[in-house]
Image: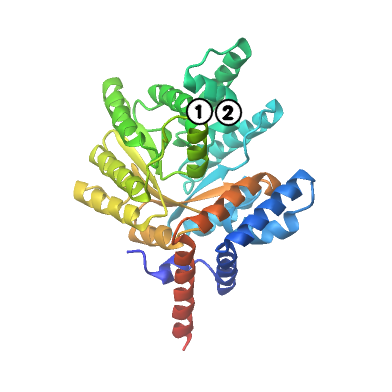
Amino acid sequence: MFQNTEIAFKWRSDKDLRRAYFLMKSISKPWLVNTGKHLANLAIAIHLPINWIVKPTIYSHFVGGETIEECIPLVRTLEKFNVKAVLDYSVEGSEDEKKIKQALDETLKTIYNAAKDPNVPFAVFKPSAFGIPRVLTKASEGADLNDWEKKEVEKFRERVFTLCKTAYENDVPIMIDAEDYAYQKIVDDVIYEMMLQFNKEKPVVYNTLQMYRRDRLDYLKYLYDQAQKDKIKIGIKFVRGAYMEKERERAKKLGYPDPIHPTKQDTDRAYNAALEFSVDHIDTIAVFNATHNEYSSYLMTELMDKKGLAKDDPRCYFAQLYGMSDHITFNLAKLGYNAAKYIPYGPVRHVLPYLIRRTEENTSVAGQTPRELRLIEQEFKRRKAAKK
């Protein structure tokens, strides 16, 4: 299903593919990624100009642009291949009220943009951009909060409400990204409050479950039971997870059980079981299958077929990050499924932490970068043969 490189890379020129190949070759070297990470952090700390080297290389490969307007040409290009776009303002969170307000205003813009652009079916935001993690952690742990902390939690709730209400009023589904284990509970609780208000007729508010967590499959089933009682719909974005080393270190340091599955196989089983449960209960649970895993993508097509669902059923979406796994996205889109690219955007300096995570992920996840390189090489061979 995913091996047709002509479909996967038809939208990329030879020049684009060569640049992608060089970049993937570079980030396959851990020492180079580690060195680049330290240099980038140093450049940020001492305010060195970095746009000239970052923007035409790693930034242009993984990021859509600095503004919504800069992303539009990419959205239109993807549209020609039946690939949707989800624009994600990827600026890291801050405790500064002014910066939080800027993030809120920009996220509202993404909702208004999605409302007028049929090729942008979702809005998305990272909740830590609108709350103070250390306060959210205390709230998640059930600790006593002082008056200031209580106000900060309420501000967080109000900002999330503003975004979800705006999405509801503009008929735009909105996804809330997952966060650290330490403060995910308060995020889960607030998201369910939003679902109760805005998901009565159809899923507008989507939570994100990181399936590398041991408790998430049970939590999914709990959510389903609650939704049945409350007579609402739920939307779930499924990911494997992004903070494994950090989570394990924190658990060890503070002496609580490791919240992460012990093996990748356990995570894969939980992820696929979550897809099966959700598609089996599709009348209540809408699925946003955000994965670079070929089997989990293929599995969902089989589950949909078994359930008798149309390929473009609006309750079923597939997505991959921009700059990765084109062979999954574009082949699914060609077959008529709802396939999307998750496109981060924002000023170069502010998006750099995201870029560092992406390069580290491509370096650390076994087989991911070699797979990208193999597919590009395969496409070059195909193009060369086609010219003879």
Res 126 quadrant in image: top right
Q: How is the image coloured?
A: rainbow
Q: Residue 77: where, in percent of width, then height?
A: 53, 59
Relative depth, front residue between 143 and 356: 143
Disc 2 + disc 1, Cβ < 8 Å: yes
Which element carries disc 1, helix, strand or loop? helix
Q: Is residue 200 above or below residue 148?
A: below
Residue 353 is left or right of residue 321, and the answer is right
Location of residue 15 with respect to 136 vertically, above or below: below
* Extreme residue toward the top, this view: 147
The amino acid sitting under disc 2 is: Pro
Inspect this view and state whether residue 180 appears.
no
- Residue at image mark 1: 183
Q: Residues within 10 Å of mark 2 (few under 14, many from 20)?
A: many
Instruction: List x then y, in percent, for residue 268.
Output: 34, 49
- The residue positioned 31% from the left and 43% from the top of the image is 270
- The amino acid at mark 1 is Tyr
| x and y, in percent, of residue 340 in the image | 44, 51
Q: Which mark is residue 151?
A: none
Identify residue for label 2: 133
Which structural element holds mark 2? helix
Residue at 26% from the left image edge and 39% from the top image edge:
277
The relative height of residue 96 versus residue 242 in the rendered view (above or below) is above
